[in-house]
């Protein structure tokens, strides 16, 4: 998968599948399943590190995880999140930081949160040859400013944001937590693909956090998530069986033990 191929999927009416991954083995499995785009999200802060939000994630941590993921992916387009505040410090710092991601990880593109207010940064990155996936609607990096994770309904601003990131050179845009009808309108108003998360079926593609999909997320699952497996239950059962086997002496088996 390449950036031009991904853009062409919208024109061809082909839906785009996107999932997160944060390490080599899960990225390999996701890639082998034929997912179009793998996102190394700053969601690793909550999913992997157990933090309350994505704000503590550093650029070095994104690079560490993205390098593993990019090595595993043989087919998918790999996109790395730009964490807070790696692109909010001006266009040239953003280019420097994004260039580090591409040079040190072999990822294909970066993702940044922002609409009109980040158009100058997106244009700078695109001009420098760094493909950019934008992200509008609910922006987790602005959680304190927004006051929570809520549906975004400002039609005029969302339409303006989508046009601005397209005109600045973004090759696609994530729409997070929009009413389905509005997300479909935004999708129809621009030529680049939209990737929805909690934004209904009218987007050009969909993205989920892998741990949510697999039933590995503790606590409350977002309402937009479809849980396709209950791996938490499966893993718990396997580990419990291992514990019991060790305690009872049935593991290890003598004939499988090195002499």
Image: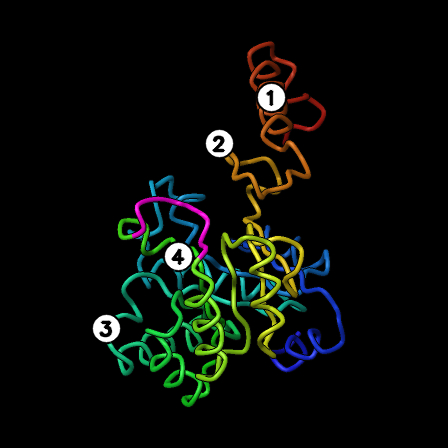
Observer-nearest residue: 239 or 115? 115
Which residue corresponds to mark 4?
A: 139
Element on which disc 3 rests: loop
Q: Which residue is drawn at 72% across and 60% down?
A: 34
Q: Do the residues labelled 4 and 3 touch (CB within 8 Å)?
A: no
Q: Do the residues labelled 1 and 4 touch (CB within 8 Å)?
A: no
CA distance separating discs 4 and 3 = 17 Å
Q: In this view, which residue lies farthest toward the bottom?
A: 127
Q: Residue 242 carries which label?
A: 1
162 relative to 210, above or below: below
31 on left or right of 80: right
Q: Do the residues labelled 1 and 2 touch (CB within 8 Å)?
A: no
From the viewer's perspective, is the residue at label 4 or at label 3 nearer?
Answer: 4
Magenta extent: 146-153
From the viewer's perspective, is the residue at label 3 or at label 1 nearer?
Answer: 3
Which residue corresponds to mark 2?
A: 220
218 relative to 129, above or below: above
- Residue 188: image location, x then y, percent: 63, 71
235 relative to 250, above or below: below
Element on which disc 1 rests: helix
105 on left or right of 31: left
Q: Magenta span has 156?
A: no
Considering only order in the chain, which callout, 3 or 2, is on the residue closer to the N terminus? 3
Q: Are marks 2 and 3 in contact (CB under 8 Å)?
A: no
CA distance separating discs 2 and 4 = 19 Å
CA distance separating discs 1 and 2 = 28 Å
């Amino acid at each position: 998968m390449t950036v031009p191929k991904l853009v062409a999927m919208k024109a061809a009416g082909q839906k785009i599948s996107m999932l997160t991954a944060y390490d080599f083995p899960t990225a390999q499995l996701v890639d082998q399943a034929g997912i179009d785009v793998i996102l190394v999200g700053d969601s690793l802060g909550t999913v992997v590190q157990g933090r309350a939000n994505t704000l503590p994630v550093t650029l070095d941590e994104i690079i560490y995880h993205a390098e593993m993921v990019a090595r595993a992916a043989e087919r998918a387009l790999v996109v790395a999140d730009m964490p807070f505040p790696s692109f909010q410090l001006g266009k040239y710092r953003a280019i420097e930081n994004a260039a580090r991601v591409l040079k040190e990880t072999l990822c294909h593109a970066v993702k940044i949160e922002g609409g009109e207010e980040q158009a100058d940064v997106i244009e700078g990155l695109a001009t420098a040859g760094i493909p950019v996936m934008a992200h509008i609607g609910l922006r987790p990096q602005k959680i304190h400013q927004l006051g929570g994770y809520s549906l975004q309904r400002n039609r005029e601003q969302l339409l303006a944001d989508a046009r601005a990131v397209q005109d600045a050179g973004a090759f696609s845009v994530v729409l997070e937590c929009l009413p389905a009808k509005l997300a479909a309108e935004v999708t129809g108003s621009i030529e680049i693909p939209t990737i929805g998360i909690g934004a209904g079926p009218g987007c050009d593609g969909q993205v989920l956090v892998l741990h949510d999909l697999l039933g590995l997320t503790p606590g409350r699952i977002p309402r937009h998530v479809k849980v396709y497996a209950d791996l938490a239950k499966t893993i718990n059962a396997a580990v419990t069986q291992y514990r019991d086997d060790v305690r009872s002496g049935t593991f290890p088996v003598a004939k499988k033990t090195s002499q």
